Amino acid sequence: MTSETVIRKLSKILRRKKIFGSLVGLAIAIILLITLEQRGIKTGSFLNRTMVFATPLLLGTLGEIYAERSGVLNLGVEGVMSIGAATGVVGAFAAGAWLGTAVGMISGALLALLFAIVAIHFRGMQVPAGLGLFMLGLGLSGVIGIGYVGKSLPHYFTAAPIPVLKDIPIIGEFLFQHGPLVYLALVLVPIMWFILFKTRIGLNIRTVGNDPAAADSAGISVFRYRYLCVILGGALAGLAGCFLSLGGPIGWVEGMVGGRGWIVIALTIFALWTPQYALPGSLLFGGIYALQFELQGLGFSVYILGMMPYLVTLIALICVLIFWKRLGAPSALLRPYRRE
Amino acid sequence: MLGLKMEKRAVPSPKTEIGVSVFSICIALLVGSVLIWVQGFNPLHVYSEMFSAGFGSLSAFAMTVTKAIPLLLISVGLTLAFKAGAWNIGAPGQMIVGAIAGTGIALFLPFDLPPLAHVILISITGFAAGAGLAAVCAFLNSKIGLDMVISTLMMNYVAFKLLQYLVFGPWQIPGARFPYSAEFPTTAQLPTIPGTRIHYPTLVIGIIAASLIYMLVKRTKLGYETRVFGENPRAADYAGISKFKIIMLVMIISGGLAGLAGAGEIMGIHHMLKLGVDGAGAIYAASYGYTAIIAAWLGRRSPPSAALAAFFVAGILVGSHRVQILGLPFAMVSVILGIILLGLIGGAILAEYKITLGRKER
């Protein structure tokens, strides 16, 4: 094989944007980790923190991907995460962390159901309805959580390292020394990818989101799939909220979701509406949060660092939009369905 | 058999639309009263307290008008943006950068200006800053298709962090404990109606802005194009209406008015830059920029009724502050406003039908 063919093959691979993009991302990540290592920040603990910050984003994004794939944009994720966090704490005080999580997920699902009724049955405009949900969720969580501000949790999720695997250098610390919800989020990625792209149900969801009229004439119930997807999205956003409030002893703090719900909306686009890209996307933003944490220790302004996740969101989306001309958004997104 | 008959209307009925507005307010108050009752309070007592705090006396009325000023400016701008289908959710951020830029002019101008010129310069700077921030989002939307909801929202957080940075950092008065900037010179302060905090020049500008936008939408070619674009972007494209022009225009106007509202707040109320400049208490969804969205929608996206709605929403905000003293969380206001918005959106479908009581055909 001549060097020319090697170069040609290599450039052919590089022209495939997804591979090229991930290579660039990986290179930047490795350079970053080496620089941090030189500054005395251990790669293992940095990656560990990245995973912790990434988990709520991942859970929320997986849910939102399903909702949007079925054609419904739920902008209220911030509010739903908030209500999940607050009710999760209430549940945890009453009956422990696991039951708290169940309560958080159920209340997230119920709030999403309210949105679904407005957006699907009443054919309301999804953007303002989502904003209403955001305000309602934020307000309700403030009302529910008022008695729990500053109270330490009696039960919360502690790290449950996986035997053997946890001892692999770096990787072990990165992936296998976490609380149970982190493992759950990681396991959900392949499951939700499989359901969405390899099963009948997934095909139906995508059809409902792309061409509801065709789906309807094929005998698929558009409303049922949309309701299920939006409710699933709400439950996962509630779970993400629970991870935030029950992942440590601190419990409920007003405004603890802190814009993560909006980053989830952006991540859904960044992941091109696919569960498998939600993982690297969430890790990128988890890394930004973790970096923010580390740089704080090096004397940078907390407030300037606080802009980072939001600015990076914008930059990341701009890059995606410039490099991918066709994102592949569900065609019927934002369009309520009615039978003619 | 007697039942409800539904017929599709060609044009949504304005009467039903007002009915839907009233209906969603009622639903919100009903859900609110359940929440109040659950917390061990008497809903009727709480609501009467709220009402008297917002509208009950002349001084209460003045408070409400004071809070209505920024809401009026922002919501009137938003009616235009929403008419064009431009989802400007970035009013809180645009308001904050308006206040920041205005403070820069108020405090750090190397030369002295006469009072009127100073105030005018601050207002223009505030408008320009808000408009600039919105224009960036509009540009990214029309050139590369970046979703405007996301870009304007991200800017809100960036602007808020910038505000925090300034008032906790370089602009904080040396030695002071509170996150405040230095107080403005008197040349940069707006006059108020004696005995109240109503900075009437901003109020007048708000009313003028409302009438101008009303005229723009109803009477001009540009307004017509905006409406066509908002209702059917594809038809607008065929008609040769430039998307870039419309989006830029409505975002610059709505962002600029939000920036102006920020400048008005610092000149008229605070006389300094501080954290509460966006009107948010503990609940950031209760800031002027977000609540103005509700006013715009409650006013059915038309400037005159949005102005009325802004006044009503301001009353709720004032009332909620009073309710806090009774021991209820301020977050209640966000619940009530959120339900109003959901009710408005969900109820919009009713205006599309003619509903009559009649004999059902079998």
Image (cartoon, rainbow, N blue to C red):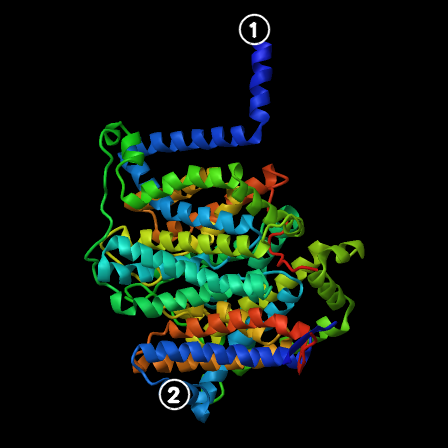
Q: Is residue B176 left or right of B101 when viewed as pictured?
A: left
**CA separation in Å, label 2 and label 1:** 86 Å
Q: Quadrant of the C terminus of chain A?
A: bottom right
Whole-percent x, y for residue B143 in the image: 65, 48
Q: Amino acid at mark 2?
A: Leu
Residue with the most extreme right position: B239
SS for dot 1: loop
Q: Which residue is mark 2?
A: B44
User: Mark 2, chain letter?
Assistant: B
Residue with the most extreme bottom position: B57
Which of label 2 and label 1 is nearer to you? Answer: 2
Q: Residue at x 54, y 41 (%)?
A: A200
Q: Quadrant of the N terminus of chain A?
A: top right
Whole-percent x, y for residue B100 in the image: 47, 63
Q: Is residue B47 left or right of B24 when viewed as pictured?
A: left
Q: Which residue is mark 1?
A: A1
Residue B204 visible (yes or no):
no
Crowdedness near tag 1: few (<14), some (14–19) or many (≥20) residues, C-alpha within 10 Å:
few
Is label 2 in contact with label 1 (beta carbons under 8 Å)? no
Q: Amino acid at mark 1?
A: Met
Q: Residue at x 30, y 38 (%)?
A: A48
